[in-house]
Image (tube, grey):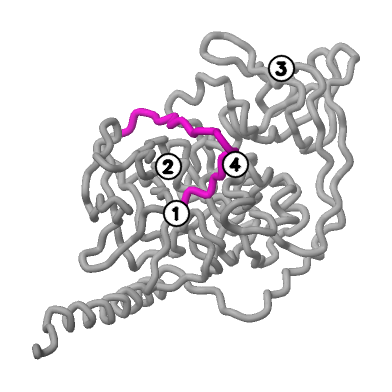
Amino acid sequence: MTGPDPRGAATRLRQAVVPGLFAAVATFALAACGSVAPSGPTFSPVPLHVAARGLASAIVSEPIFLRSGDTPDGPELRDDMGHRLTLDPGRLVVPLGEPQPGPGGSWVRAWVAPSTTIWPGDFTAWIPVTDRGAPSLQLLDAPACPAEATIGTLAPLTPPDRLACAGSTPLTFDARTWLPGVVATYDVAPAWYGTNADPAGTTSLFDPGPIPFGPGAKTQPQAAGAWVDARVPPGVPRLPPGVLLRVTGRFDDPSAGACRRSLPNGGASLGLPVEAAADSVAWCRRQLVVSGWQVVLGSEGRPFDPADPQLHRNELVLPAGATLACGGVGMPPLTIRIDPSQIEPVWIELPGGRRSIAIFGNGFHLLPDPVRVQAANGVTLVDREVVDPDRGKPGIVLCPSGDEVSFDLPPA
């Protein structure tokens, strides 16, 4: 007969202790950065009583040119090649006052809504209501304000309508998070309102639908069709992407009074106007400023458990026979970061402090002792490991695509 194997006892002890260590470290970190939403019945949405309707908007019905300045006879907006800045048919605008006479007809000062397909993003300018007597805009009725504040009722509204309907009411709602749906055109001071140089610094909030994670879920704001960009001030932890959060915040934050937007380097070449101080204040008042958040579901669609960290998963389900090609872009060396105490335990660190989201196929798992991401074929990734985005790593298929980097197993 032989006695107990001390190595087996040590292994069993390690298996029992390490998850507990994960839990202790993660619980401490969570207390410092966010919290877990309490279990039980879903909270009641915040009622809205500020206004009955939002603002009337309009659709551009023919190509139109724009002007800047205090009055409609200000200078035309032109890029550095002398070309007029044009709004094409279909672009959404929100008039901000009454029409005024100007060159060739009536003009109105309007906010131009951003587009996911047309550059540049949102700005304020003078727009012709009539051009040589013909209407340039198709006016739309002002939308009814929602009775309650949810991501499903707020996101479809334009930013001016959100402010009109919610005012400065403290809001709490559940939303899934991801990168912003459009790249900002202007930089903002203070910078936590968002900058053109770091779009990943802004987090979008959107409704994923009845299935919050996995096949059938809307995983990005563009797929949801509407979203709210969260602005996170100092003292509030950054919002983790790819999770379901209970977010608390408000529009019309007091910080908006000192807010200013400016064109980043090269921005003037687009033909955009230098924004007036009053327009910057108005823009910031329309933004949702987050005061706190709680985790409802982690990135794998289950309640947060610090003893069982969750990875960002590839939720895309391709049709039978279809293949996905990597549309990668040139990226600097990728530094793998792993910290099981974080709600987002694995991410990519880039030079200058930028981050990219690390997305894994189902063949990858985060394991303790030593902490590592391990693929089913035994290949591992460890904290602070540097990976060449062009060469990848043997045994792992890597697709670097800017703000996201995906990892998968090679085809069988």
From the viewer's perspective, tell me whether residue 143 is left or right of residue 277: right
Give the labeled residue for mark 3. Answer: 65
What element does badge 3 sit on? strand
Q: Residues within 10 Å of mark 1 (few under 14, many from 20)?
A: many
Q: What type is the residue that disc 3 sits on?
A: Phe
Residue 46 falls in image quadrant: bottom right
Q: Does residue 292 appear in this view?
A: no
Disc 1 versus disc 3: nearer the observer: 1
The residue at which mark 4 appears reads as 280
Q: Nearer the viewer, mark 3 or mark 2?
A: 2
Magenta residues (range): 312-331
**Horizontal placement of 240 versus 348: left or right?**
right
Q: Residues within 10 Å of mark 4 (few under 14, many from 20)?
A: many
x then y, percent, for residue 221 = 61, 46
Quadrant location of the N terminus in the rendered image = bottom left
Q: Earlier in the sequence, mark 3 or mark 2?
A: 3
In contact (CB < 8 Å): disc 1 and disc 3: no
Q: Which residue is mark 2?
A: 404
Q: Is residue 263 left or right of residue 29?
A: right
Image coordinates of residue 54 in percent, x first then y, are 81, 49
